[in-house]
Image (spheres, rainbow, N blue to C red):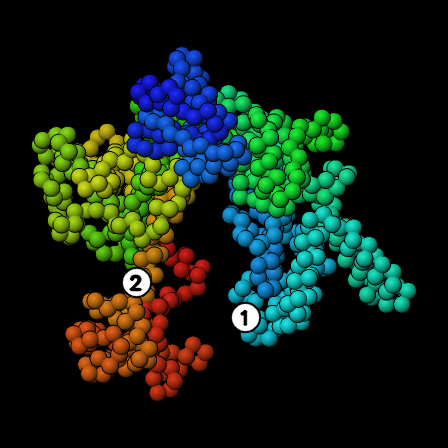
Amino acid sequence: MADPSSYRPRPGEIPDSPGVYRFRDEHRRVIYVGKAKSLRQRLANYFQDLANLHPRTRTMVTTAASVEWTVVSTEVEALQLEYSWIKEYDPRFNVKYRDDKSYPYLAVTMNEEFPRVQVMRGQKKKGVRYFGPYGHAWAIRDTVDLLLRVFPVRTCSAGVFKNAARTGRPCLLGYIDKCSAPCVERISPEDHRELADEFCDFMAGRTGTYLRRLERQMGEAAEDMEYERAARLRDDIGALKKAMEKSAVVLADATDADLIAVAEDELEAAVQIFHVRGGRVRGQRGWVTDKVEEITTGALVEHALQQLYGEESGDAVPKEVLVPALPDPVEPVQQWLTDRRGSGVSLRIPQRGDKKALMETVQRNAQQALVLHKTKRASDLTTRSRALEEIAEALDLDSAPLRIECYDISHLQGDDVVASMVVFEDGLARKSEYRRFQIKGFRGQDDVRSMHEVITRRFRRYLAEKERTGEWADGVDGTETGDDPRPVDGGDPRPAAEPYAAEPYAAEPYAAEPGADGRALTDGPALKDDDGRPKRFAYPPQLVVVDGGQPQVAAAQRALDELGIDDIAVCGLAKRLEEVWVPREDDPVVLPRTSEGLYLLQRVRDEAHRFAITYQRTKRAKRFRAGPLDDVPGLGETRKQALIKHFGSVKKLRSATIDQICEVPGIGRKTAETVAVALAGAAPAAPAVNTATGEIMDDEEGAPETTADALGESVSAGTPDERRGQER
């Protein structure tokens, strides 16, 4: 813990002018960013007696190791620079609002030749008109479906649009008059863009013009006795009114405003925003934040405004922003909003009337969001604790199993036998610890033997890690001393250079997937080897769960017994009746169906099954794609494609001479000789079969050995349902 006096600036060194300051820790990481009207007065508040500081402020200044500042000319510039630095450095002691979900928007891509209406999430793009955000994507689709009767704007993807243009046939929406079909030139680009502009005007709240125009056209059609056209216009009017009814009028004067409410306690704060356009609530969103610094309601509002409008401009910033408390000072924030909109913005607290009543509604939503957030966190922790306690009680464990490992075997009729290991810590999936294995000790289908091999391999690695780190000096039963943790009985045929490691993890992209607890997969106290790589099997579990019944449990326990490990509990969960089996017991442990412990075991088992079958399918697909050219060393995908494109099939390539193979661009003589030798020793592919007639075809009949066969892109036999039924 640093002493703030060690890095306190000297008297007179800090300027008495507006600016932005940054606190950095001993590693030069920015931990806090702030702005001030007077840097000298603001920073002096941090370097006083620690007993007088708020606990959170005290933690920040004792964590910091230096402070620096940047002088600006106005408070508005300070506000802009503070927002930029918070976004760039992501300082740990600043308030950062977390969206509880990614809100969907109704977007119109006005930057395309033929604008498209679609649902969009994430970062906003230049040249796209956005409406919302909405609570649910289905609400957007329902609204668009109603409006397409009147504004038949394109909604299809680029691929569908190009395909329709190529074939000259529009999609279904074009046939039912819910798309003007610009793909087949039923409408000019100019007229389609005008249609998209009208759609945007209607969504922006200018609804009266279109309703009056349609009503006038309906009356004219009725007078001319064009009753079918009048009926269609009547239905269009009904669709527009139904779409308008989805957002009730809350402000009678067609106001464009955003209402922001804050609910807070000592530790957290929840923010709710209602977007009102044309007097109607067009969208809603909410954020929750930890109060990692001493902060007022006005400062929370200021941070919310920065996050809400920091990337917006023009009409995305409304004319009026209603808040529960004003930032101090309010003038720079109001000027910043005005600059972003390009015209005046009113930032104020509603005092009376409809706006105050609506603000009370938003405030109730914020309060409920804070209560729900706290309830979820407490409920999750309480539920997980109860589940672990129930498991410990049912299995007669000394303590709750804080780390649970579950193993499952997967194969397809005895082929591509693999296993998975998933890890749950404190009742949450720890995906960075997941491992997967190939069964190589034998061939064929034997789940019990496979389970014994996997448990043996996993815990031999654990014992080897303990021995290598010097936790004991002598060997352990069933393990040889030294760096080669292979079994004494030679159960795994791999050489000593590859000692029972789980299969490499990179083949399945879990490294970018967030864990169930919201943490990054690389979080946690992962031990490191000397080369910096995380140890794969350094942590022992308190409980091993196997997917299966009594035979699988017995195999797992036997593997542990052979290794001399007696401090790890084992159980199995059978799918048939969800029975929990324990070693050396003839009867299973039956947990109530409503038990949180049973629910946790089911989640662990199902996750292990999912992970195993995903790996098994990956290996099977790779095997099915294998072709004769895959065995040629040094021949990559590009040159394989070039060979097949040049000769047309592997059959013709097999009959080619080395000189002919050398004619392919990128193929040298040495590679050509290697290809020729490899194909000479490979078995020829099966003849092609016409699936419609059953006729066997050869190259001369126009059905050469295909590129898919050559590159291994074949498909397994049977329907998808049949293949799933064969998988374990």
**Depth check: 699 or 312 in front?**
312
Q: Earlier in the sequence, mark 2 or mark 1?
A: 1
State the residue position of label 1. Answer: 163
Spot occupied by residue 500 in the image (x, y as percentages of width and height): 19, 46
Kindly indicate whether the residue at mark 1 contacts the one at mark 2 (C-beta within 8 angstroms).
Answer: no
Spot occupied by residue 71 in the image (x, y as percentages of width and height): 44, 32
Label 2 neighbour load within 10 Å: few <14, some 14-19, many 20+: some
Q: Looking at the figure, which quarter contains the N terminus?
A: top left
Image quarter for residue 199? bottom right
Label 1 neighbour load within 10 Å: few <14, some 14-19, many 20+: some
Spot occupied by residue 398 in the image (x, y as percentages of width and height): 30, 23
State the residue at coordinates (19%, 73%): 671
Spot occupied by residue 722 in the image (x, y as percentages of width and height): 42, 60
Q: Could you tell me if residue 358 is visible in this image?
A: yes
Image quarter for residue 406? top left
Q: Outermost residue, bottom direction?
A: 700
**Depth check: 721 or 375 in front?**
375
Image quarter for residue 513? top left
State the residue at coordinates (29%, 57%): 416
Give the CA distance from mark 2 to mark 1: 33 Å
Label 1 is placed on what type of residue?
Asn
